[in-house]
Image (cartoon, helix red, strand yellow):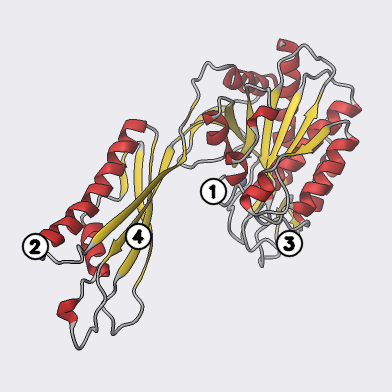
Amino acid sequence: MVNQDRLADVFKMLVQIDSVSRKEGAVAKALKEIFESLDGEVVFDGAGSEVGGDTGNLIAKFKGSEPGVEPLLLNAHMDTVQPGEGVKVLFSEGTFTSNGETILGADDKSALAVLIEALMVLQEKKVPFGPLEIVITVCEEVGLLGAKHLDYSMLTARYGYSIDATDTEGIVTQAPAANHVQFKVHGRDAHAGAAPEKGINAIQLASKAISEMRIGRIDKETTANIGLIQGGTATNIVPALVTVAGEIRSHDPMKLEAETQRMLQVFERHVSGYRKSFPSEDGLPKLDVDVYEDFSVLHISDDHPVVTLATEAASNLGRHMAIKISGGGSDANIFYGHGVVTAILGTGMKDMHTVRESIRLEDLVRSAELLLEIIQLHAKKG
Ligand SMILES: [Zn+2]
């Protein structure tokens, strides 16, 4: 039922519309027109102004032919990473790529094309389907900002799918929670040659703390990273300030908290230790800590309807869906945190966030076939 050529054309059309994060307006407009032409009711929420972008999240509702059925959420994101402007799409041996100067944008326009193809088939073949709530977010790539600012009162669906992963034969049901941490170590500036003894070297103090930290893989379900360091002004000045930022992820909220506290304590120990050893009137060195939850955990049990619906749909097509665990966070974590149980499906995209990004047309077709079967089976089950 899936029209391969039409799917390929829609995909090519979408990747050639620039939509890097915060500049998704043009692709939002194109999507609105398509969804409306398929009898969807399209609105935008106010997330655009909150994240400093040129459009909000797009919410398209389709009544379907079976109004008694529970609504199903379908989600993808419309923004892409850089270099993502002026994409020239190539197609050879069944595979889409860019010309090597930009990303392709299959992340996540492959999902948009798959969604649109499924909707077109539903309409064209008059396939019975239940209400669909489609949420296309902005700014996923810059911290899941669209999903974080989404107006959830606009949704009634209690479960559904985010289409934003690689494997067409897998469903992601678990992803870790993450905390973001930032440490500012305030030392004291001084002339590095004339009076170094008057200074407190913030860079050295921070490096002592970092060198004692547990980072990398902590255990099977927990990781930690220091990813950013910034400080100092000149080689002849004892640096008065250094900023260090990192993250901790875990599938276990207790471990997430414990590991975050551990990082914090290492910094506190070093800074307060210095203060005790070398007391001064200005109370330096000082530490400012900023910790916030970047995203909460995604943990869907294997017997939840959102999982069984997808695995049954796959087996109707003679395929087998593997239940998968992810190490990353996505819009699905945010939806799940707001009570909408969201599992993640894949489209076959590869090497995302690089200029080597690619996707096979065959995988786009497989992804669309599965989504169609899920939507039909959902309507049958009521
Ligand atoms: Zn993505």
Q: Residues within 10 Å of mark 1 (few under 14, many from 20)?
A: some
The residues bearing labels 1 and 3 have C-alpha atoms spaced at a distance of 23 Å
The residues bearing labels 3 and 2 have C-alpha atoms spaced at a distance of 58 Å
**In this rendering, would 335 be left or right of 379?**
left
The residues bearing labels 2 and 4 have C-alpha atoms spaced at a distance of 23 Å
Q: Position of residue 380 (x, y in %)?
A: 75, 12
Q: Secondary structure at mark 3?
A: loop
Tell me the tag on residue 244. 4
Q: Nearer the viewer, residue 85 or 362?
A: 85
Q: Position of residue 322 (x, y in %)?
A: 54, 28
How many numbered callouts?
4
Residue under circle 2? Answer: 277
Q: Nearer the viewer, mark 1 or mark 3?
A: 1
Query: Can you tell which quarter of the image residue 252 is in?
Result: top left
Q: Look at label 2 and name its amino acid.
A: Ser
Residue under circle 3? Answer: 87
